[in-house]
Image: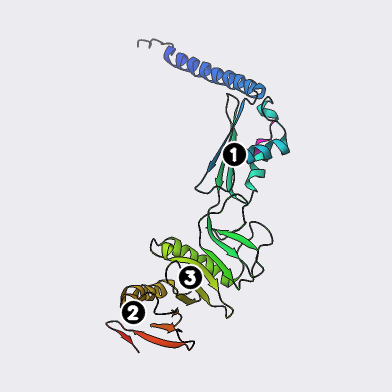
Amino acid sequence: MAKRKFRFPWRIVLYAAYLVGGITGIVLLMGTIQVRSSEQACNALQIDILGAEAFIAEKDIERLITQEYGQLQGRTLESIPIHEIEQRLSELPYVSKARVSSDMNGLLHVQLWQRKAALRIIDQNGEGYYVDETGIKLPLSPVYAPRVPLAHGGIAEGIEQPLDSVETELVRGLFHLAQFISKDSIWSKQIAQIYVNPEGDIELIPSAGKHTIVLGDAQDLEGKFEKLMIFYRGILPKVGPRAYDKVNLKYKDQLVCTIDSTGIEKDSLVQLGSNSLNTQ
């Protein structure tokens, strides 16, 4: 019986050599990069502020970083407390998220995402604050006022600390009302202000016309604004824009339109049916 000829596995040996060489090269390269990174100086600070608001400015962020952490340019990247700076910027009231990173060329990159205001409130003591789109309170800014619905009047809830959550049912209702108005192209132009009267009812002040719209609470907003649309499209064109002083949407399936031209209030009740519109 003939003996099988032994063949040395050169291909396997070559593959193994290539693999070992590749791993060694990567390790050496990573070591070189790490050494270079630890010695790399910060050459520039780039600040990007994202979002439609303008609560904060790049120069203010750069000033804050310099005041609290010293001049960064010229220092090695390893000596800069990147994570600490990121955490500090995340705590700013107008910032929803912060990210700080560096690259091999010595660039320190700061990215900030701003909070978006949904409502401005002036409480019963005359103090003001914003509520952002997540229901968090923000202090008023001395340099920027976003165009959002304004609510004032009998609002007891104020702001004690920035980033507190909304607490009362009234302010939660005002917040949802402001969101509802802002998402509608018609109502965002028609409604100028939100007012809480002494009885605790929410009133809407339109941008045109002398009438006041009594909403009551912030429940069933779609139904109430459907009735308001009936008033504007079905009633107001017939009687004129100055016929009524008050439009009450509080009552289910009814509009109560009040005129007070003689000093004596007179109500006109509009009963809303599925197929008819009757005025009494």
Magenta stretch containing residue 139, yes or no? no
Q: Which residue is mark 3?
A: 205
Q: Which is more N-terminal, label 2 or label 3?
A: 3
Q: Which residue is mark 1?
A: 58
User: On screen, 133 above or below 268?
Assistant: above
Q: How far across and how far down the image is residue 57, in percent? A: 59, 42
Q: How far across and how far down the image is residue 84, in percent? A: 68, 40
Q: How far across and how far down the image is residue 6, in percent? A: 41, 11
Q: Which is more N-terminal, label 3 or label 1?
A: 1
The residue carrying pointer 2 sits among few (fewer than 14), some (14 to 19) or many (20 or more) residues within 10 Å by Cα, namely few
Mark 1 → mark 2, Cα distance in angstroms: 54 Å
In front here: 100 or 222? 222
Q: Which residue is mark 2?
A: 239
Identify the disc placed on residue 4. none
* Residue 265 appears anywhere in the view: yes
Region in magenta: 80-84
Quadrant of the rendering where the C terminus is positioned? bottom left
Amino acid type at mark 2: Val
Amino acid type at mark 1: Glu
Q: Which is more N-terminal, label 2 or label 1?
A: 1
User: On screen, 32 above or below 231?
Assistant: above
User: On screen, 87 above or below 234?
Assistant: above
Residue at (53% x, 18% y) in the render: 20
Magenta segment, principal secondary structure?
A: helix
Amino acid type at mark 3: Ile
